[in-house]
Amino acid sequence: MDRTPGPKPRRSAPRGSYAVGDERRARILDTAVEHFAQWGFHASSLARIAKEVGITQGGLLHHFRGKEDLLVSVLRHSEEQDRERFFSREPRSAAEAFTVLLDLAAHNAARRGRTMMFNTLAAEAGDPGHPAHDHFVRRYREVIDYATVPLRAAVERGELAPDTDCEAVATETVAIMDGLQLQWALAPETYDMVGRLRTYFDRLLRSLTTDGSGMPERP
């Protein structure tokens, strides 16, 4: 009988080590959000982020290749969460599309750090050389497209006036959302971003719908 020992089984890393790594990565992302919000990309420091997390800069670089990789990871993580939560299904009406955007605004108001980061980085990313430039160009295109499609469908159903410029309405809607969000960020305790946005959406819908209806009442 052949008793030659076979290859030793490969040892896998303890399951606990994966959990620790995932938890540390999440803490790095959360801390980076606050730093990018306060100082922007260029003035933020990997050393300061690592120190706040409680690890060395080398430990941070074990999870992210550098500051640009960290920035892209932060933006991608936030975008994936928003896409899954708000944009995973097609709205059945123009009013429902605006309701989804209103829910997104309410969600942003509840996560001030990420919203402040978005405002800071969106302003910086106007520079084509900024590492987040392409991300924001693509993001705005996707959000405008998301808002345009249900508006065009509503025109075809006769819900909206036939001469509605759907892409123009979508573009202006996104601009209003960001403008109100910027004003809210300056004085969040005294500024009702969601309420003002709802009033705008209601007025906009009443000007576009063939029956003059506006935003539905919230339950």
Image (tube, rainbow, N blue to C red):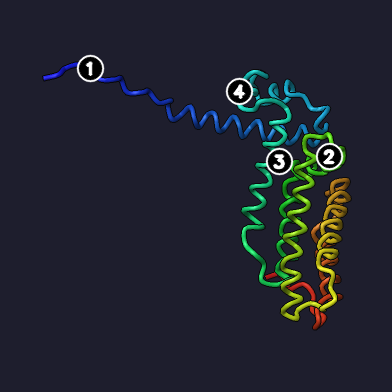
How many labels sit on residues?
4
N-terminal of the pair, mark 4 or mark 1, is: 1
How busy is the neighbourhood of tag 1: few (under 14 within 10 Å), some, or many (20 plus)? few
Please provide percent x and percent y for residue 82.
Answer: 67, 51
Task: Report how far apart the C-alphas of labels 1 and 2 lie in the structure.
Answer: 60 Å
| Label pair 1/3, CB-CB below 8 angstroms | no
Q: Secondary structure at mark 4?
A: helix
Residue 28 figure quarter: top right
Q: Nearer the viewer, residue 52 or 160?
A: 160
| 8, above or below 102, in the image | above
Q: Secondary structure at mark 1?
A: loop
Label 4 and label 1: CA atoms lie apart by 37 Å
Q: Is residue 76 above or below residue 5?
A: below
The quadrant of the image that shows the C terminus is bottom right
User: Of the residues under marks 4 and 2, which one precedes in the sequence?
Assistant: 4
Callout 1, which amino acid? Answer: Pro
The residue that mark 4 highlights is 62
Query: Is residue 148 rendered to the left or right of residue 11?
Result: right
Which mark lies nearer to you, 1 or 2?
1
Residue ranking furthest to the front: 2
Read off the residue under disc 1.
Answer: 5
Mark 2: amino acid: Ala
- Disc 4 marks a residue whose amino acid type is His
- The residue carrying pointer 3 sits among few (fewer than 14), some (14 to 19) or many (20 or more) residues within 10 Å by Cα, namely some
The residue at which mark 2 appears reads as 125
**Alpha carbons under labels 3 and 4: distance apart:** 19 Å
Estimate the x, y position of residue 37 in percent, counting from the top left: 79, 37
The residues bearing labels 4 and 2 have C-alpha atoms spaced at a distance of 27 Å
- Check disc 3 and report the residue beneath it: 75
Percent across and percent down for residue 174 are 82, 57
Residue at mark 1 to residue at mark 3: CA–CA distance: 50 Å
